[in-house]
Image (spheres, helix red, strand yellow):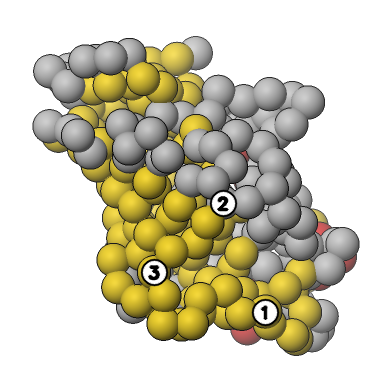
């Protein structure tokens, strides 16, 4: 079911299935910023990635001597969230641990996803609460897809020198990297840029990137903050681009004895709280 929030400038819809952002429209001209999904291309729109990001080696991990199976990007995107509140310019959704999550992820948690419209800005806050009797290990990420066209440009706030991780056909990270930027700001969306799947970037100096359209009329500035990884992805040639702040990353081919050893894994003490926030500023 879709839930609507709005203010004087924007109207947004969120699906309680996955707490997924379904729509973000500028009221002045009715322009839709969010990819509307197409099963023939990619059915998703803005999945919440939890409690892993990317793919596990053989879709499995171990924790305290027991083996678990987990699907790519985790289970949150496949679950229906409880609607905590939805009124005016704000909506809050909640996923709690239950028997189904415990079967593949042995931690007690609460995952809140809050959407706010503040002027011409959408703010999305993802909050993990550790309800486990002990330390909790997890990854958390956003995956919003924005309408764009071939030739549009993603422009970082600062000049960047960045390489992308590469992944194999099983979405497992390889040892080699490929250059993306060399003291540059702009990544041009071409029909071939995602032929080897997502750009997986790290050590980024900027904290935001602007999606610049050829018509100069529907630009957004996406603030991702201080995250260890930023994914940029689309199906090759498709009319959208995903800008993905990641607190976590795909496995590589090294076997690990415990989830606590996973690359970029996040740790929370008992009762701890972790926030991942991104904002979308609609530019005039």
Task: Report the front residue among 187 and 22.
Answer: 187
> Residue, x 35% and y 76% (percent of image)?
159
Question: Image quarter for residue 131?
Answer: bottom left
SS of the residue under disc 2: loop
SS of the residue under disc 3: strand
SS of the residue under disc 1: strand
Question: Image quarter for residue 118?
Answer: top left
> Is 28 placed above or below 14 here?
above
N-term-proximal mark, 3 vs 1: 1
Task: Report the front residue among 222 and 137.
Answer: 222
Q: Residues within 10 Å of mark 3 (few under 14, many from 20)?
A: some
> Residue, x 74% and y 85% (percent of image)?
176
Q: Residues within 10 Å of mark 2 (few under 14, many from 20)?
A: many
Residue 182 place in picture, x, y as percent: 48, 82
Rounded to the nearest angstrom, the CA distance separating label 2 from label 1 is: 17 Å
> Residue, x 38% and y 46% (percent of image)?
212
Tell me the mark number nearer the camera, choosing from 2 and 1. Answer: 2
Residue 108 place in picture, x, y as percent: 50, 54
Task: Report the front residue among 279 and 182.
Answer: 182
N-term-proximal mark, 2 vs 1: 1
Rounded to the nearest angstrom, the CA distance separating label 3 from label 1 is: 17 Å
Q: Is residue 262 left or right of residue 276?
A: right
**Residue 205 visible at all:** yes
> Residue, x 41% and y 22% (percent of image)?
32
Q: Is residue 269 left or right of residue 17?
A: left
> Is 275 placed above or below 282 here?
below
Q: Are marks 2 and 1 in contact (CB under 8 Å)?
A: no
Instruction: Please give the residue where the numbered disc 3 appears in the rendered image.
Output: 185
Instruction: Please give the residue where the numbered disc 2 appears in the rendered image.
Output: 189
Rounded to the nearest angstrom, the CA distance separating label 2 from label 3 is: 13 Å
> Is 155 placed above or below 39 here?
below
Instruction: Please give the residue where the numbered disc 1 appears in the rendered image.
Output: 178
């Amino acid at each position: 079911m879709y839930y609507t929030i709005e203010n004087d400038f924007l109207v947004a819809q969120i699906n309680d299935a996955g707490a997924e952002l379904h729509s973000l429209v500028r009221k002045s001209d009715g322009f839709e910023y969010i990819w509307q999904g197409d099963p023939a291309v990619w059915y998703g729109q803005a999945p919440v990635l939890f409690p892993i990001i990317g793919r596990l080696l053989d879709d499995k991990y171990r924790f305290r001597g027991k083996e678990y199976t987990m699907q790519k990007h985790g289970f949150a995107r496949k679950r229906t969230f409880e609607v905590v509140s939805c009124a005016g310019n704000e909506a809050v959704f909640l996923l709690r641990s239950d028997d189904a999550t415990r079967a593949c992820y042995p931690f007690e948690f609460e995952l809140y996803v809050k959407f706010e419209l503040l002027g011409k800005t959408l703010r999305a806050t993802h909050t993990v609460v550790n309800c486990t009797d002990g330390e909790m290990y997890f990854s958390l990420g956003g995956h919003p897809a924005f309408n764009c066209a071939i030739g549009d440009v993603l422009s970082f706030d600062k000049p960047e020198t960045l390489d992308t991780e590469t992944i194999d056909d099983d979405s497992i990270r390889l040892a080699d990297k490929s250059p993306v930027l060399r003291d540059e700001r702009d990544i041009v969306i071409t029909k071939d840029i995602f032929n080897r799947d997502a750009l997986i970037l790290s050590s980024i100096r900027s904290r935001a990137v602007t999606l610049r359209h050829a018509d100069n009329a529907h630009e957004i500035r996406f603030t991702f903050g201080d995250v260890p990884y930023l994914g940029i992805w689309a199906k090759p040639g498709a009319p959208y681009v995903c800008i993905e702040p990641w607190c976590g990353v795909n496995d590589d081919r090294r076997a690990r004895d415990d989830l606590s050893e996973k690359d970029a894994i996040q740790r929370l003490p008992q009762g701890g709280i972790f926030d991942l926030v991104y904002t979308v500023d609609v530019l005039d």
